[in-house]
Image (cartoon, grey):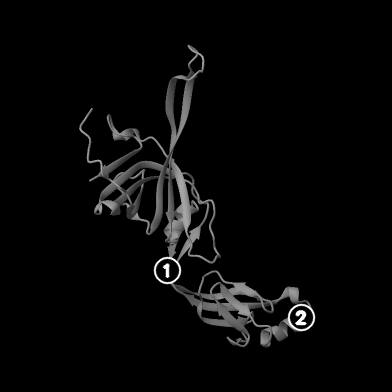
């Protein structure tokens, strides 16, 4: 038996989690922000053979086989990249710009959803361009577009139609700032290389570094959009075999501990 390392090693881990596209060996690893839990779970099958040589039974032989290793991550930074990761989506950065004559239909008290978020310098006109409506009187600005007032010139026109469901066609000019746009559920399986660059707070902040060579992360089971607590995203996935690690090396993960 090899000489044992120091026995005393209580553990309380903290640190940063980094992800890299596993298909790009020389690609960048990105920090995913505040992570409250990074957990590995080993699932195994136990095959037993009973002892039939004497009364009372017992176990004659046992074989244990690892079925899988699952990595679970709880993230607290709900940025667009992490949302894309958790929803198997794509994130696109949209530059600031302006929109001219976006068509909409006004209904009393209803939202006109604009193509771009957080509009500024909004100008709303009739579909023929002859009438300009007034912010704060005929409509208000919201993050998702504009909300038509229940009183004012637009409301009067809607009442005059006699069929409110038809609404009043309008044209909208506005500016918008840069933003990120996430399209959820647009990606298939993607494998990630994960590095935990951590320390053991219970042992003088000694290094605790873990590399998961190939993890197939699944979509988050839920995404809470309204609640009474700060949001989190939980994702998990299986550690897959990475045969490129070579002889004598784990094909799944490595721990480096000082």
Q: Position of residue 58 (x, y in %)?
A: 48, 20
Q: Kindly identify which residue carries mark 1.
A: 95
- Determine contact: label 1, label 2, CB under 8 Å: no
**With 110 as the anchor, is 6 left or right in this view?**
left
Residue 56 in sight: yes
Q: Position of residue 16 (x, y in %)?
A: 33, 55
Q: Position of residue 86 (x, y in %)?
A: 47, 53
Q: Secondary structure at mark 2?
A: helix
Please, is residue 21 above or below residue 124 in the view?
A: above
**With 13 as the anchor, is 120 left or right in this view?**
right
Q: Which mark is residue 209?
A: none
Please, is residue 208 above or below residue 250 in the view?
A: below
Please rate how many residues cluster around mark 2, counting C-alpha atoms within 10 Å: few if below 14, some from 14 to 19, many from 20.
few
Q: Position of residue 70 (x, y in %)?
A: 44, 41
Q: Residue furthest left?
A: 3
Q: Secondary structure at mark 1?
A: loop
Quadrant including the N terminus: top left
Q: Residue at x 48, y 22 (%)?
A: 48
Q: Which mark is residue 161?
A: 2
């Amino acid at each position: 038996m090899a000489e044992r390392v120091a026995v005393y090693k209580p553990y309380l881990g903290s640190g940063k989690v980094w992800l890299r596209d596993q298909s790009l060996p020389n690609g960048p690893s990105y920090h995913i922000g505040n992570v409250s839990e990074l957990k590995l779970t080993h699932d195994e099958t136990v095959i037993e053979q009973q002892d039939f040589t004497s009364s009372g039974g017992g176990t004659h032989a046992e074989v244990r086989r690892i079925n899988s290793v699952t990595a679970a991550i709880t993230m607290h930074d709900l940025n667009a990249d992490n949302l894309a990761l958790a929803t198997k989506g794509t994130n696109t950065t949209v530059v600031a710009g302006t929109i001219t004559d976006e068509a909409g239909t006004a209904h009393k008290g209803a939202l006109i959803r604009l193509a771009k978020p957080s509009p500024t310098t909004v100008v709303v006109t009739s579909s023929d361009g002859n009438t300009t409506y007034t912010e704060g009187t005929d409509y208000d600005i919201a993050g998702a577009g504009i909300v038509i007032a229940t009183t004012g010139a637009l409301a009067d026109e809607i009442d005059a139609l006699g069929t409110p469901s038809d609404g009043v066609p309008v044209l909208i000019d506005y500016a918008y700032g840069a933003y990120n746009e996430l399209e959820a559920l647009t990606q298939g399986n993607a494998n990630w290389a994960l590095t935990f660059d951590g320390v053991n707070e219970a042992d003088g902040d000694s290094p605790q570094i873990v590399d998961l060579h190939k993890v197939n992360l699944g979509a988050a089971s839920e995404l809470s959009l309204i609640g009474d607590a700060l949001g989190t995203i939980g994702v998990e996935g299986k550690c897959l075999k990475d045969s490129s690690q070579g002889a004598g090396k784990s094909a799944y993960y490595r721990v480096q501990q000082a």
